[in-house]
Every structure is written in structure tokens, then in C-alpha cells.
Image (cartoon, rainbow, N blue to C red):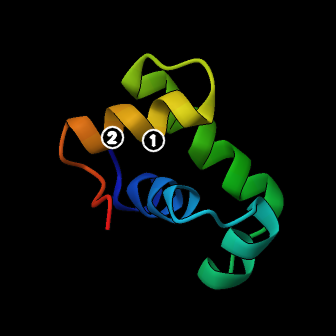
Amino acid sequence: MSLREVEVLQWTAAGKSQQDIGDILAISLKTDEVHQRSARTKLSALPTAQAVVLGISMGFIDPK
């Protein structure tokens, strides 16, 4: 997983919306969607919530 994919999932896990994530990371909504889709694909997850859970269980994301 790329650093940006991990960042996007980390912020998603923190409850941030796609708009919030775009603002925080200074990226467009489309770019955020691309990173989330790529992370889901790499983790073999369907919804983003599943990708977050898998990311936590695999140690990519800190559940804070």
C-alpha cells in the first residue's frame, strides 16, 4: 500500500468525510476516491469500511 492510500484510510478510520480528507491532504475528491479504490483493491475489500478494518488488522492503520 502506498503512503497516500494509508493516509486516506487512516483519516477515514478517524471518521473524516471525503471532503475533510481532501482538505486535510490538499487533494481533490476525485484523487481521494482513486486512493480509496486502490486501497480497497489491494486489500481485497468491497466497502471502504472493510478496507479500514483490514488495514487495522494488518497493521497499516493505527486504530487510535
Give coordinates of residue 56: x percent, y percent: 29, 44
Tell me whether the residue at label 1 lies in contact with that at label 2, contact meaning CB atoms closer than 8 angstroms: yes
| Horizontal relation, residue 41 to residue 16: left or right | left
Q: Give, as a three-letter code, the residue at label 2.
A: Gly
- Quadrant where the image shows the N terminus: top left
- Residue 27 coordinates in the image, percent (x, y): 70, 73
Say which residue appears at 45% left-offset and 52% top-offset: 5
Q: Residue at x 81, y 69 (%)?
A: 19
In this picture, is 38 found above or below 29? above
Q: Where on the picture, by quarter, is residue 28?
A: bottom right
Q: Which mark is residue 10?
A: none
Q: Secondary structure at mark 1?
A: helix
**Are there few (<14), some (14-19), or many (20+) residues within 10 Å of tag 1?**
many
Q: Would residue 62 be found to the left or right of residue 36 on screen? A: left
Residue occupying image coordinates x 39% and y 55%: 6
Q: In terms of secondary structure, where does tag 2 sit?
A: helix
CA distance for labels 1 and 2: 5 Å
Note whether 7 is above or below 20 in the view shown: above
Q: Which residue is identified by label 2?
A: 55
- In depth, the one of 64 and 9 nearer the eye is 64
Q: Which residue is mark 1?
A: 52
Q: Residue furthest front?
A: 64
Q: Is residue 48 above or below residue 13?
A: above
